[in-house]
Amino acid sequence: MLQRTQDPDENVSLEACEFWLTLAEQPVCKEALSGHLVQLIPILVNGMKYSEIDIILLKVSLQTSVRVRVIGSSFCVSLD
């Protein structure tokens, strides 16, 4: 399924991505994927596609919802 996620045929790669989405919604997901995340995450991230408006909305969302607090030599990220 990892290979199909990278398939040059957009329909095949889309079906593979839908498989991952369906699996992610299942209770067994964490158990089933925990040993494969190192391989899976880069493939899924590389295959992500956003429209210009999606990118703008993501940037605005990140700017308004992530706060970083520095405490001594440590820091804390807070998502609102």
Image (cartoon, helix red, strand yellow):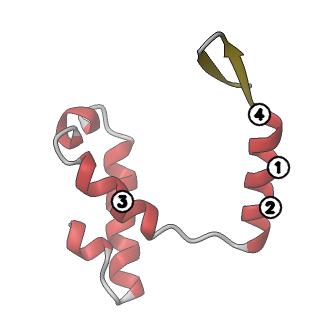
4 or 3: tag closer to the N-terminus: 3
Q: Give x and y (percent) for residue 27.
A: 30, 31
Q: CA distance from mark 4 to mark 1?
A: 8 Å
Q: Give x and y (percent) for residue 43.
A: 34, 64
4 or 1: tag closer to the N-terminus: 1
Would you call the spot at circle 2 few (<14 residues within 10 Å), some (14-19), or many (20 or more)?
Answer: few
Residue at 73 percent of width and 63 percent of height: 54
Disc 3 residue type (three-letter): Pro
2 or 3: tag closer to the N-terminus: 3
4 or 2: tag closer to the N-terminus: 2
Residue 56's label in the rendered image is 2
Label 3: state its secondary structure: helix
Q: CA distance from mark 1 to mark 3?
A: 24 Å
Q: Give x and y (percent) for residue 45.
A: 45, 61
Marks 2 and 3 close (CB-CB < 8 Å): no
Identity of the residue furthest to the front in this view: 73
* Quarter of the image with the N terminus in it: bottom left
Q: CA distance from mark 4 to mark 3?
A: 25 Å
How many discs mark residues in the rendered view? 4
Residue 65's label in the rendered image is 4
Would you call the spot at circle 3 few (<14 residues within 10 Å), some (14-19), or many (20 or more)?
Answer: few
Residue 42's label in the rendered image is 3
Label 4: state its secondary structure: helix
Disc 1 residue type (three-letter): Val
| Left or right placement of residue 58 versus residue 10 in this view | right
Label 1: which residue? 60
Label 2: state its secondary structure: helix
| Left or right placement of residue 49 versus residue 47 in this view | right
1 or 3: tag closer to the N-terminus: 3
Label 1: state its secondary structure: helix
